[in-house]
Image (tube, rainbow, N blue to C red):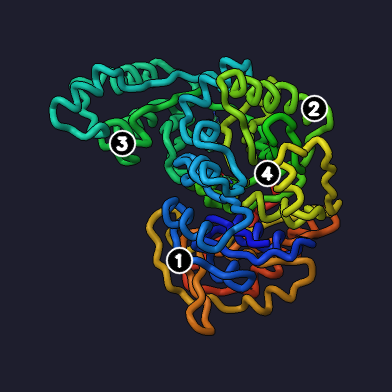
Amino acid sequence: MKILVVGSGGREHALCWKLAQSAHNPEIFCAPGNAGTGQIGRNVHLAAEDIDGLLKFAQKESIDLTIVGPEDPLCAGIVDRFEAVGLKIFGPTAAAARIEGDKAYAKKLMRDAGVPTAEARIFEPTSVERAQRREAGRDDNDVKPEYETAYTMARTYVTSREEGVVIKAAGLAKGKGVFVHSDPADGLRTLEKIMVENELGAAGSTVVIEELLVGREVSLLALVDGSTIYILESAADHKRLGDEDTGPNTGGMGAYTPSENLTEAELEMIERDVFVPVIDAMRRNGITYRGVLYAGLMMTPGGPKVLEFNCRFGDPEAQPILMRLQSDLVDVILATIEGRLADVVLQWDQRNALCVVMASGGYPGAYEKGKTITGLEEASQVANTMVFHAGTRQLGGRIETNGGRVLGVTALGEGLQAARTSAYEAVRKIQFDGAQFRGDIGMRVSGR
Ligand code: AMP
Ligand code: GLY
């Protein structure tokens, strides 16, 4: 059996690692992959967004199953394209992936479905405004405030707020499109950057502004086969760059599973009030959801509320979750694609797992690549630990940095504390110039 994994992050290394343990004995390809995936299977020099190239490759190599890691190709319709030529692929279609790719759509869907989420207003350019821009020979994204009522209205709205606001670019922005302002006045500058200076390009032409929720964050990922929803073990990630949740938001600086203090009753409530209604609402609109549906939730005093949906495995959540999964991942994925999830019972390692991300100096801003990484061999000898690669590249006998998030050092342990101790023991053995990581993964700041 030949399997193609699309992507190049820690999530994709973890997927390849888990797939390689399957009784199906798959031959694994990863496009474009990293130094870690290259040690498990064959890296293919095709970008995750190069759908034409990936399709040709899958046909030429007779790939039996393609698994898509990141959101960009999913939102761009890779699943639709593969399925149209009869290739088996894991992930939602473009219409279903819109739940991540368009936050304004996701918000409306949640409202229609009665899913608890932050109160929000959506500011989008009107069709008249879009037409005016086109007439003026401007690009659709080239917003000018003089005739941009969406911008004016967003400003008025933010000015009227007394409580904190969260401003979100509606489109895909590589995790950089969300701005949390406890003082709403600071939001005005964010609006200017997104809606006037077009810092995020087309992703920011529509903006969602919502109330700032307070509570503990939980990531719940579910497999969905079109009808059956199977919620995986809970996880939590740390989005901010610095210890004690300081600094800018990142793609995620660490994660652990299970999330602490999530009761069976809360889990049932989230399944009933979040997953079931949103999948039903999509189905009513003629959209069948197949793949991973990830709900980012805030556990507020008023109950769980959805912050966002993602149409894929989380990164870094996938690393600790897949380390705990004992079932054969190939079987699980085939069952999801083929609508047989109702017959599946997943087996989990009862231990905790925790992942510490090591990132390049400067991340999430500009950073340099090409720094030699040492100590990987020593780190891999720490018991119950896996060093998942993200932005790495193999050059002869040397492995060097090749991205913002470089490694996801992940450990299993009896209790969160034991997992944390092993992960940090391995982290301390790894060096590269400028490396940064949080020292408090798995240690929640009280009240968050
Ligand atoms: P998102 O990509 O929408 O999940 O947002 C990224 C991060 O921003 C989340 O993980 C939260 O930490 C934070 N965030 C998003 N929406 C809100 C909100 N309404 N209230 C408070 N924090 C939020
Ligand atoms: N860890 C957050 C995400 O995958 O979007």
Q: Which residue is mark 4?
A: 236
Label number found at residue 399: none
Mark 1 → mark 4, Cα distance in angstroms: 33 Å
Q: Amino acid at mark 1?
A: His
Mark 4 → mark 2, Cα distance in angstroms: 18 Å
The secondary structure type at the circle numbered 3 is helix
Question: Mark 4 or mark 2: which comes first in sequence?
Answer: 4
* 370 displayed left or right of 259: left
Question: Mark 3 or mark 1: which comes first in sequence?
Answer: 1
Residue 71 visible in image:
no
Instruction: Please name which of the two marks, 2 or 1, marks the residue nearer to the observer.
Output: 1
The secondary structure type at the circle numbered 4 is strand
Question: Which residue lies at the image location 81% right of the left edge and 53% below the top edge?
Answer: 327
Q: Which residue is mark 2?
A: 268
Q: Amino acid at mark 2?
A: Glu
Question: Mark 1 or mark 4: which comes first in sequence?
Answer: 1
Q: Which residue is mark 3?
A: 193
Mark 3 → mark 4, Cα distance in angstroms: 30 Å
* 413 displayed left or right of 15: right
Residue 41 at what x, y percent from top left? 61, 69
- Between 133 and 198, the one lying in front of the other is 133
Residue 439 at what x, y percent from top left? 63, 58
Q: Amino acid at mark 3?
A: Lys
* 216 displayed left or right of 213: right
Instruction: Please name which of the two marks, 3 or 1, marks the residue nearer to the observer.
Output: 1
Label number found at residue 45: 1
Question: Which residue lies at the image location 48% right of the left edge and 69% below the top edge?
Answer: 401
In the picture, the quarter occupied by the C terminus is top right
Q: Is mark 4 within 8 Å of ligand 2?
A: no
Mark 2 → mark 1, Cα distance in angstroms: 43 Å
In the picture, the quarter occupied by the N terminus is bottom right
Q: Amino acid at mark 4?
A: Ala
